Amino acid sequence: MSEREAPGAEHVPVMLDRVVELLAPALQEPGSIAVDATLGLGGHSEALLRRCPQSHVIGLDRDTQAIEAATRRLDPFGERFTAVHAVYDELGAVLADRGIDQVQGILFDLGVSSLQLDESDRGFSYAQDASLDMRMDQQSSGPTAADVLNTYPAADLTRVLRDYGEERYASRIASAIVRERAREPFRTSGRLVELIRDSIPAPARRTGGNPAKRTFQALRIEVNGELEALRSALPAAIDALAVGGRIVFLAYHSLEDRMVKRTLAAGAASTAPPGLPVELPEHRPVLKLLTRGEAPTPDEVAANPRAGSARLRAAERARSTEPRSADTRRQTESPRTTEKTRPSGASPPPDAPRDDRTHGEE
């Protein structure tokens, strides 16, 4: 979920022109629907609504502050935009509730948004001393980063830091956390940053940026269940995509990018058994790859440093399978979603379309 932007700068969505270039061909027909699964501040959605005037955008976000900010920003588009308070693994249920079986475009801009990074009291940034919260949905009753630090056994902390932060010194940092929390529980980020710096050998501290970035990434992913949500969302998103529809992903660390890459590669591969003389229609690839891990241009990174780690992948739905109907999805998924009601009038009927985040570490 992210609109990466330089601190204090006007909101600058990552790889905006390229994202729109990839999605726009599928959004030219009247009634076409795009889902911005990570709405953030609404920059990508705004560009799609401007450049694809026949389209409707449904924007999802778990962060109510983002929903409110994007709704204000996109108010000029009226009923062409619908905001929904939901996590992207609820995409199928969100569409089912609106009687929508298929959509023509989907965008996932993964990670943490500029809104979240730049508000110090959210605890996402290791550059500012703040409360260790890190929940993207602050209405959630789920654990905070402080809860993870103060209650997880050393083995679980090591696993989180190693698997989600790819932290070489995970065991050393976890042991220091357990030792220090016995003296006083962790409450703010500044103390944690200092502990991490002291736990890492001096030579390692001199390269690779702030030594806390991997630990903060790991805690954020754990607190918000980001990889589990993405793992569930990937097949649901492809299932919802109409033939000729397009899907775009922006990932900011290798864990997300590998998951997206493998899913798209599997969809773009034939499932015909080896040696079969003729590929039957049901074995043909479901997806056609449009990109292979594109990076932002040097000029964009210079203007927007938080975009530096972004990798863009995109695919087009090549053939249908047997998509679940909206009724079937509604029976099998129980959303925790809330639609942002627009003051201008009622929601459009089920058969009509109703209508940025910066993710990564600093």
Image (cartoon, rainbow, N blue to C red):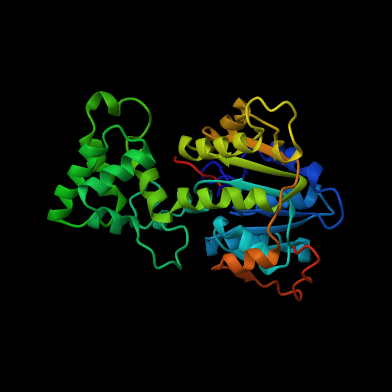
Between 213 and 262, the one lying in front of the other is 262
Q: Is residue 126 visible?
A: no
Give how far across and how far down residue 264 sits, in percent: 61, 37
Between 75 and 349, the one lying in front of the other is 349
Number of callouts in the render?
A: 0
Answer with left or right where residue 95 lies relative to residue 256. right
Between 163 and 55, the one lying in front of the other is 163
Answer with left or right where residue 234 lies relative to residue 72. left
Residue drawn 67% across the image and 69% down it: 97
Give how far across and how far down residue 85 sits, in percent: 58, 65
Answer with left or right where residue 360 lies relative to residue 277. left
Residue drawn 63% across the image and 69% down it: 339
Residue drawn 59% across the image and 62% down it: 67
Establish if 55 lies above or below 300.
below
Give how far across and how far down residue 182 sits, in percent: 13, 54
Establish if 185 lies above or below 23.
below
**Split into 4 quadrants, where in the image is the C terminus?**
top left
Q: Is residue 99 visible?
A: yes
Between 327 and 40, the one lying in front of the other is 327
Give how far across and how far down residue 161 sits, in percent: 32, 42
Residue drawn 69% across the image and 64% down it: 326
